[in-house]
């Protein structure tokens, strides 16, 4: 018969419920004198949890008065509060504090106590049950100043799995606050992510599947109709952003989603991909039409091609009719989502109709 490890018993569970509730209320109101008096009588109150499994340390860190919050954290830690305790969402005090958008002095205070306890109790790589790091939680909450300071402090290469720049930007976009999202997108570390040729320069990734990419950020920006953000992103990585924008806007048209109209600026960025693609397909024929008499353009095969021999009017109509094969097939099979026959399909799914982002997402 095997030995089964028993869960440690919470030493505060025997404390009077009214006493615990009264102490939590003192922390919420920032009554340091009352806290000190109660802790002198019962030191275990520093570990007493609320119904959501939050300790007094959580409540102290999220107090709106930064100076008072720091004093309460120091008081609780000096009375054996547990820095690494987690609540029902699997957040420890640093994750909880960043979710609530605290001032940087509170974060510094928590790291001071982390160092005093030997380090490693709280880390930038730690996440809650939704795999959200401190940085991502700050972005999700729309806490611009804290998020930018965290971006300054965190090494996004060392902690790439939890703090990937594209995950961070998508979290900011999810707030539906374009000013906040623009501020995050303009941070040098996020810009570096857009301009990196090889996304695998970040440590921590395995396999080819990436859940957050240039393309998923593009889709998120379009979904929230953030035209100014998309213009910024397009300037950072035109090839991928305009292609992802074109694929996603046409997917919305095919599916006829019930949503607000897409802004003309966004459609303009999407159309630049189609213009570039058509030019790449037709430039050789256009050059032969214009300079066919030159020796280097005198290939019999090119000279005899139908597109070379067409009059200008029909030639222009043919070029404007061209669309990428993936769009034609997806439009044809839009009712058969499970059996898309696109030539560019990945694992049997159209890369934009049944979308699964990959490491070389939308490379052109």
Image (spheres, helix red, strand yellow):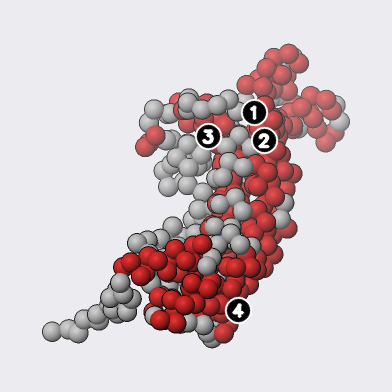
* Within-10-Å neighbours for mark 2: few <14, some 14–19, many 20+: some
Looking at marks 1 and 2 on the same chain, the residue that comes earlier in the sequence is marked by: 2
Residue 39 appears in the figure: yes
In this figure, which residue is indicated by the disc labeled 4? 112
| Of callouts 2 and 4, the N-terminal one | 4
Instruction: First in sequence, mark 3 or 4: give its number.
Output: 4
- Mark 1 vs 4, N-terminal side: 4
Q: Earlier in the sequence, mark 3 or mark 1?
A: 1
Disc 3 versus disc 1: nearer the observer: 1
Contact between marks 1 and 2 (CB within 8 A): the answer is yes
| Number of marks in the rendered image | 4
Q: Find the distance from the CA under tag 2 to the CA under tag 3.
A: 25 Å
Q: Nearer the viewer, mark 3 or mark 4?
A: 4
Question: What is the quadrant of residue 265 in the picture?
Answer: top right
| Labels 3 & 1 near each other (Cβ < 8 A) | no
Q: Which mark is residue 227?
A: 2
Q: What residue is pinned by disc 1?
A: 263
**3D distance between C-alphas at marks 2 and 4:** 42 Å
**Inter-mark Cα distance, 3 to 4:** 55 Å
Residue 199's spot in the image, x, y percent?
A: 61, 59
Residue 96 falls left or right of residue 158: left
The answer to whether mark 1 and mark 4 are in CB contact below 8 A is no
Report x, y in % for residue 40. Answer: 44, 82
Q: Residue at x 40, y 60 (%)?
A: 89
Against 320, residue 189 (above or below) is below
Residue 3 at x, y percent in the picture? 19, 84
Q: How far apart are the alpha carbons under marks 3 and 1? A: 24 Å
- Residue drawn 62% across the image and 21% down it: 321
């Amino acid at each position: 018969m095997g030995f089964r490890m028993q869960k440690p018993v919470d030493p505060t569970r025997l404390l009077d419920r009214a006493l615990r509730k009264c102490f939590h209320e003192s922390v919420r109101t920032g009554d340091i004198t009352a806290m000190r008096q109660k802790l002198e009588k019962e030191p275990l109150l520093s570990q007493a949890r609320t119904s959501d499994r939050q300790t007094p340390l959580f409540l102290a860190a999220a107090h709106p008065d930064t100076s008072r919050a720091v004093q309460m954290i120091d008081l609780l830690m000096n009375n054996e509060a547990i820095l690494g305790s987690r609540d029902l969402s699997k957040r420890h005090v640093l994750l909880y504090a960043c979710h609530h958008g605290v001032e940087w002095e509170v974060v510094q205070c928590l790291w001071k106590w982390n160092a005093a306890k030997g380090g490693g109790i709280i880390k930038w790589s730690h996440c809650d049950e939704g795999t959200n790091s401190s940085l991502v939680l700050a972005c999700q909450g729309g806490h611009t100043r804290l998020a930018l300071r965290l971006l300054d402090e965190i090494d996004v290469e060392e902690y790439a799995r939890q703090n990937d720049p594209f995950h961070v930007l998508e979290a900011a976009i999810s707030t539906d606050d374009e000013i906040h999202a623009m501020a995050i997108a303009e941070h040098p570390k996020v810009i570096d992510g857009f301009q990196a040729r090889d996304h695998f320069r970040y440590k921590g990734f395995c396999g080819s599947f990436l859940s957050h990419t240039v393309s998923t950020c593009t889709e998120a920006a379009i979904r929230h109709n953030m035209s100014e953000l998309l213009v910024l992103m397009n300037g950072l990585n035109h090839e991928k952003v305009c292609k992802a924008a074109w694929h996603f806007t046409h997917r919305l048209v095919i599916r006829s989603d019930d949503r607000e109209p897409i802004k003309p600026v966004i459609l303009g960025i999407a159309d630049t991909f189609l213009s570039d693609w058509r030019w790449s397909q037709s430039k050789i024929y256009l050059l032969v039409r214009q300079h066919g008499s030159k020796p280097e353009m005198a290939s019999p095969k090119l000279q005899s091609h139908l597109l070379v021999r067409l009059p200008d009017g029909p030639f222009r109509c043919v070029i404007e009719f061209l669309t990428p094969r993936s769009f034609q097939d997806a439009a044809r099979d839009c009712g058969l989502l499970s059996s898309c026959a696109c030539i560019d399909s990945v694992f049997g799914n159209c890369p934009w109709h049944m979308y699964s982002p990959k490491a070389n997402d939308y490379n052109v």
